[in-house]
Image (tube, helix red, strand yellow):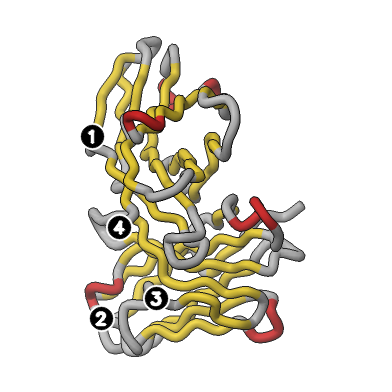
């Protein structure tokens, strides 16, 4: 069955430090991968997506993610975290053999930023 | 271009009552999806409309949930009667037709439902 695993429920980093949020997926074909962010009181905002091509994708707010097929991973990174990055981050996969085009989400990683 | 909108933003009802959530997709988007996140769990798919037809409703938890999309524009999700375990955030998403467009879904801000 298709699934997305985010092994870290929450992470705390210092402002200005680098960040990596982990995501592993289980999917039978080429996945279409996404990272979303949900800030307090806000909806889901798309950070970046991977469909094909260059395995390092750039997103908004200075985020990037790297698709590694051999590791079934799509980790999210940011070189220097800002206090406004504190939010919950969701990795997701969409594909036609999930029984339609529904999005399958990971459980989310909550990011805390300390001064 | 307006994004996906959802109404209300927050609803508090008592167990046994009825609640109707509304979603207005991005204009011209034929695909409309409902998802929900109950406390501490993943965001889970509920169903998918293509225009006014239900393409996939495999995620609907039980027959207390009824989704409609009359005319292929906005959609409603009714919960009747509501139970405590229905509390959570209900997200709506939409996407246009065609190729890769299926894969990129635009999400609304969600409706937070609290059943007491």
Q: CA distance from mark 3 to mark 2?
A: 20 Å
Chain letter behind tag 2: B
Chain letter behind tag 1: A
Residue B100 locus on image (x, y percent) = 64, 51
Closest to the camera, between mark 3 and mark 4, is: 4
For the residues beneath circles 4 and 2, the answer to whether they share a chain is no
For the residues beneath circles 1 and 2, the answer to whether they share a chain is no
Q: CA distance from mark 1 to mark 2?
A: 31 Å
Q: Which mark is residue A106?
A: none
B22 relative to A102, above or below: below
Q: Which residue is mark 1?
A: A8
B81 relative to A3, above or below: below
Q: Which residue is mark 2?
A: B83
The image quarter containing residue B50 is bottom right
Chain letter behind tag 3: B
For the residues beneath circles 1 and 4, the answer to whether they share a chain is yes
Closest to the camera, between mark 1 and mark 2, is: 1
Task: Decide: few, some or many residues near mark 2? Use Cα within 10 Å; few <14, some 14-19, many ≥20.
Answer: some
Task: Decide: few, some or many residues near mark 3? Use Cα within 10 Å; few <14, some 14-19, many ≥20.
Answer: few
Closest to the camera, between mark 1 and mark 4, is: 4
Closest to the camera, between mark 3 and mark 2, is: 3
Q: Earlier in the sequence, mark 1 or mark 4?
A: 4
Q: CA distance from mark 3 to mark 4?
A: 15 Å
Is the Cβ of the residue at disc 3 closer than 8 Å to that at disc 2?
no
Residue at figure coordinates x 32%, y 89% from the top left? B81
């Amino acid at each position: 069955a298709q699934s997305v695993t985010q092994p870290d429920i929450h992470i705390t980093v210092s402002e200005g430090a680098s960040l990596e949020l982990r995501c592993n997926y289980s999917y039978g074909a080429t996945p279409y991968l996404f990272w979303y962010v949900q800030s307090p009181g806000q909806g889901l905002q798309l950070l970046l997506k991977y469909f094909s091509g260059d395995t390092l994708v750039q997103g908004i707010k200075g985020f990037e993610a790297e698709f590694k097929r051999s590791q079934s991973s799509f980790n999210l990174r940011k070189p220097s975290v800002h206090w406004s990055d504190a939010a919950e981050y969701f990795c997701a996969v969409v594909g036609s053999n999930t029984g339609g085009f529904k999005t399958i989400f990971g459980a989310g990683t909550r990011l805390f930023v300390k001064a | 271009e307006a994004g996906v909108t959802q109404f209300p933003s927050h609803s508090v009802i008592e167990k046994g009552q009825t609640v109707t959530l509304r979603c207005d997709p991005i204009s011209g988007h034929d695909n409309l999806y409902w998802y929900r996140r109950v406390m501490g769990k993943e965001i889970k798919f509920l169903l998918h409309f293509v225009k006014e037809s239900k393409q996939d409703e495999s995620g609907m938890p039980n027959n207390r949930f009824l989704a409609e999309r009359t005319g292929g524009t906005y959609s409603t999700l009714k919960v009747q009667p509501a139970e405590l375990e229905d509390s959570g955030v209900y997200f709506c998403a939409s996407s246009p037709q065609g190729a890769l467009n299926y894969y990129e879904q635009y999400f609304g801000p969600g409706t937070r439902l609290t059943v007491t």
